Image: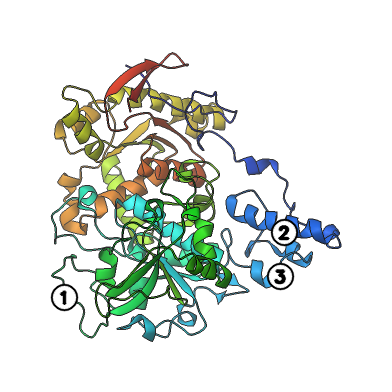
């Protein structure tokens, strides 16, 4: 048995095998564009052309070509001096910036964005003259992280301060029972001070804004923190746009946690990225946060839903604190664009989400024990596999008894060899990258017999039961440690369609200069093998 469906690992254009294009093995189309191409000084007297190019410039900035980068971040100033866009409007987000922004000043100084420490009410702590944006999501950890990246990206588009909620547990992913697993703050996982500096943009956490029981498992029986006020808040609904507002956007766990009584106004149907998908265009969200865009939505008389408590009345969306009900299904161009190389959400925000030093330190100890090496020994280069099985296999096995629903390890082994060849091609024979032998497996599989077969391959993995990780750090940490381990690899093999695989592949390629590929695995129904163009058995699953 050999390899699953994959994208070629060279930088040449892959053959068209019917699969959507991806970032794997392909250089960004932006690399063909020379630096400084946005310098339009010579066009400042040609007003029609300037206006048109100004629009193109702004769209390009956030959809993803290349432009000059200075030490303070994105260098939009050449365009600003040309009279197209005022300089102070364009200064903001940056790649590996210095934390200083003409608009925001020192973005590391949280005191300029909040009145003081966490308060009993949001109104006590939101600073006059400052506008904010936030949004909810509850699901698997990677999907929630993507959702919060969308919040930051929307903040950048709408000139607002981003406020990131804690992650709330999806028990199907983190395990445990109801009322057992508390939320975890975004800043416990990711280095927010680094993110602020890298983007030159203010990013806050809800735990800095309002008091709440952030370390207590959530349930309807959870007692609010003493003195905390139930804030009434007008919010924006995007999760029900594809249903034309026929269903209440929903009142999630974050509203309960943060003691918010939300009323929702649904965006119009033209907010959808495509008519046949639930994804909403990020610019439709950002536009609603400007006066003209807000008026357009409110004049459209879209579906409106009242608060659940208090007066139980509709409240117009708050102009200081913009709230979106679910920010997972958000795109700049096409649905699921995180899986494409041009994804602006990844390129301009996600890639700068580095893990905290504490989390890195914990993962480092696990990796050293996994390899059986000491504190002063060099950690070997390795190829990581993310093999998603547990939650995807069960529906297939129940509906198709006797079907081998997950690709066998031999498929992944073949793709490991592909990654090795890709590393040799990229770095040259004799390089350390061309001689990688260590393979590390991460998976949600709970069957110990399956893990024994992994061990028989000579592959490494962390035994979280043996490590007693849940007891030591909590139920979030197996996934967190896996994510860090994945991010350190020089090569990656993931499962097509898994957001965790996708995130691992992106980090390996963009952070480490590595090589990544995927196995075609599962879409919820029966499995079949098919001989692919390269003569290797691929695994596909019928619709």
Residue 54 marker:
2
Residue pointed to by mark 3: 86
CB atoms of marks 2 and 3 within 8 Å: no
Residue 341 marker:
none
| SS at badge 3 | loop
The percent coordinates of residue 376 (x first, y second) are: 36, 49
Q: Residue at x 44, y 57 (%)?
A: 149
CA gap between label 2 and label 3 equals 11 Å
Q: Earlier in the sequence, mark 1 or mark 2?
A: 2
Q: Residue at x 40, y 51 (%)?
A: 242
Say if residue 321 shows up in the picture.
yes
Q: How is the image coloured?
A: rainbow
Q: Residue at x 55, y 63 (%)?
A: 157
CA gap between label 1 and label 2 equals 52 Å
Q: Residue at x 41, y 41 (%)?
A: 502
Q: Quadrant of the C terminus?
A: top left
CB atoms of marks 1 and 3 within 8 Å: no
Residue 528: quarter of image: top left
Residue pointed to by mark 1: 223
Single out the mark in the foreground, 2 or 3.
2
């Amino acid at each position: 048995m050999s390899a699953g469906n994959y994208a070629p690992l060279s930088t040449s254009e892959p053959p068209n095998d019917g699969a959507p294009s991806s970032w794997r093995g392909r250089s960004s189309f932006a690399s063909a564009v020379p630096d400084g191409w946005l310098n339009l000084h010579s066009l400042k007297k040609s007003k029609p052309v300037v206006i048109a190019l100004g629009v193109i410039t702004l769209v390009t900035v956030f959809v993803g070509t290349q432009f000059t980068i200075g030490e303070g971040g994105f260098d939009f100033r050449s365009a600003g001096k040309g009279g197209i866009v005022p300089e102070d409007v364009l200064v903001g987000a940056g790649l590996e910036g210095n934390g200083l922004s003409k608009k925001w000043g020192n973005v590391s100084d949280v005191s300029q964005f909040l009145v003081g420490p966490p308060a009993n009410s949001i109104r006590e702590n939101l600073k006059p003259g400052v506008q904010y944006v936030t949004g909810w999501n509850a699901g698997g950890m990677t999907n929630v992280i993507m959702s919060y990246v969308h919040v930051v990206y929307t903040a950048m588009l709408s000139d607002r301060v981003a406020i990131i909620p804690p992650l709330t547990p999806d028990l199907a992913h983190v395990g445990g029972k109801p009322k057992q697993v508390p939320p975890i703050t975004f800043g416990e996982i990711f280095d927010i001070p680094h993110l602020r500096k890298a983007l030159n943009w203010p990013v806050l956490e809800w735990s800095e804004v309002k008091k709440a029981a952030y370390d207590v498992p959530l349930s309807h029986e959870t007692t609010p923190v003493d003195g905390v006020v139930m804030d009434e808040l007008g919010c924006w609904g995007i999760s029900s746009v594809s249903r034309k507002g026929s269903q209440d956007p929903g009142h999630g766990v974050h509203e309960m946690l943060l003691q918010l009584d939300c009323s929702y106004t649904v965006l119009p149907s033209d907010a959808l990225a495509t008519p046949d998908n639930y994804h909403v265009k990020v610019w439709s969200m950002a536009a609603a946060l400007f006066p003209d865009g807000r008026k357009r939505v409110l004049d459209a008389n879209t579906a409106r839903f009242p608060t659940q408590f208090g007066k139980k009345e509709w409240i117009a969306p708050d102009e200081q604190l913009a709230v979106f009900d679910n920010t997972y299904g958000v795109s700049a161009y096409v649905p699921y664009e995180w899986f494409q190389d041009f994804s602006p959400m990844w390129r301009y925000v996600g890639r700068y989400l580095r893990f905290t030093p504490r989390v890195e330190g914990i993962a480092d100890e696990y990796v050293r024990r996994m390899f059986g090496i000491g504190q002063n020994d060099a950690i070997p280069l390795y190829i990581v596999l993310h093999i998603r099985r547990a939650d995807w296999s069960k529906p297939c096995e129940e509906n198709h008894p006797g079907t081998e629903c997950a690709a066998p390890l031999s498929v992944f082994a073949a793709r490991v060899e592909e990654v090795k060849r890709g590393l040799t091609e990229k770095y040259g024979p004799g390089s350390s990258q061309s001689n990688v032998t260590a393979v590390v497996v991460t998976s949600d599989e709970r069957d110990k017999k399956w893990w024994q077969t992994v061990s028989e391959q000579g592959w490494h993995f962390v035994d979280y039961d043996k490590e007693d990780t849940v007891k030591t750090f909590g139920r979030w940490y197996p996934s967190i440690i896996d994510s860090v381990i994945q991010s350190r690899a020089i090569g990656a093999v993931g499962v097509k369609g898994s957001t965790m695989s996708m995130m691992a592949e992106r980090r390996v390629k963009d952070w480490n200069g590595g090589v990544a590929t995927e196995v075609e695995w599962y879409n919820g129904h029966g499995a079949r093998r098919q001989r692919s163009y390269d003569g290797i058995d691929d695994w596909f699953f019928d619709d």
